[in-house]
Image (cartoon, grey):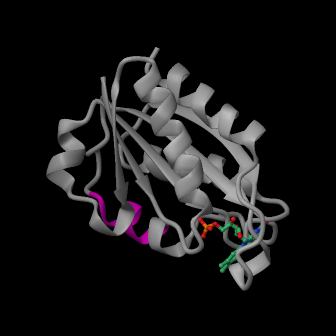
């Protein structure tokens, strides 16, 4: 199974999470391609059997969304039903709280584009509020959870 992992990152933590997910997918014998969400190309998404979106939590503790704005914009721009028949997933990082809500919201936004098979992934703590300071990286235990999620995603 080939999986495209679209990620957005400002200070690097979501890429740490997405990289661990990709490692898990590859360890299970499948292919994973990491793509900055700004570079997402509809045709290449169509060629992937799986799509995972990795987003930092933005304003997730106070709004019903929590998805980083650039991620929301790209997902909104996708044509309706373009994810029909595709296995989809989502993971998030947050500095304090809201990551689980981000993962849930990613599922809702992907469902809006036709996904009926959403596998919610882990959310982990990293960084600092508003990313004014880079803060701590994704911790080894959490990297392991992201790897396990990647391996399960393609099982
Ligand atoms: C605009 C903005 C809003 C944020 N809102 C939240 C929040 O609601 N809850 C939280 O725990 N962290 C919040 N953060 C912190 C980031 O989620 C955290 O630092 C994350 O690790 C950043 O990921 P990145 O390094 O991939 O950019 C916010 C960061 C920014 C820039």
* Residue depicted at x 59% and y 49%: 17
Horizontal side of residue 102 vs 42, given as left or right: right
Viewer-closest of 111 and 143: 143
Determine the residue positioned at 44% across, 28% down. 25
Q: Which residues are magenta?
A: 72-78
Q: Quadrant of residue 47?
A: top left
**Is residue 85 shown left or right of residue 58?**
left
9 sits left or right of 63 in the view? left
Which residue corresponds to the image point at 57% horizontal and 69% vertical from the top-left?
Answer: 68
Task: Tell me where residue 101 appears, x and y as whole percent.
Answer: 72, 53
Q: Is residue 30 positioned above or below 123 on the image? A: above
**94 to 101, vertically: above or below:** below
Q: Nearer the viewer, residue 24 or 41?
A: 24
Count of numbered circles in the view = 0
Q: Residue furthest left?
A: 43
Residue 144: image location, x then y, percent: 68, 33
Nearer to us in this view, 79 or 35? 35
């Amino acid at each position: 199974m080939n999986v495209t992992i679209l990620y957005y990152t400002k200070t690097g933590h979501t890429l740490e999470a997405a990289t661990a997910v990709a490692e898990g997918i590859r360890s299970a014998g499948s292919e994973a391609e990491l793509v900055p969400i700004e570079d997402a190309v509809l045709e290449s998404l169509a060629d992937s059997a799986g799509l995972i979106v990795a987003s930092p939590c933005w304003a997730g503790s106070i709004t019903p969304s929590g998805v980083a704005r650039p991620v929301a914009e790209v997902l909104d721009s996708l044509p309706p039903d373009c994810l029909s028949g595709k296995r989809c997933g989502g993971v998030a990082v947050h500095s304090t709280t809201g990551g689980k809500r981000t993962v849930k919201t990613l599922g809702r936004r992907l469902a809006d584009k036709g996904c009926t098979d959403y596998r919610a992934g882990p959310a982990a703590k990293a960084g600092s509020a508003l990313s004014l300071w880079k803060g701590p990286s994704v911790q080894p235990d959490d990297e392991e959870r992201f790897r396990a999620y990647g391996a399960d995603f393609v099982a």
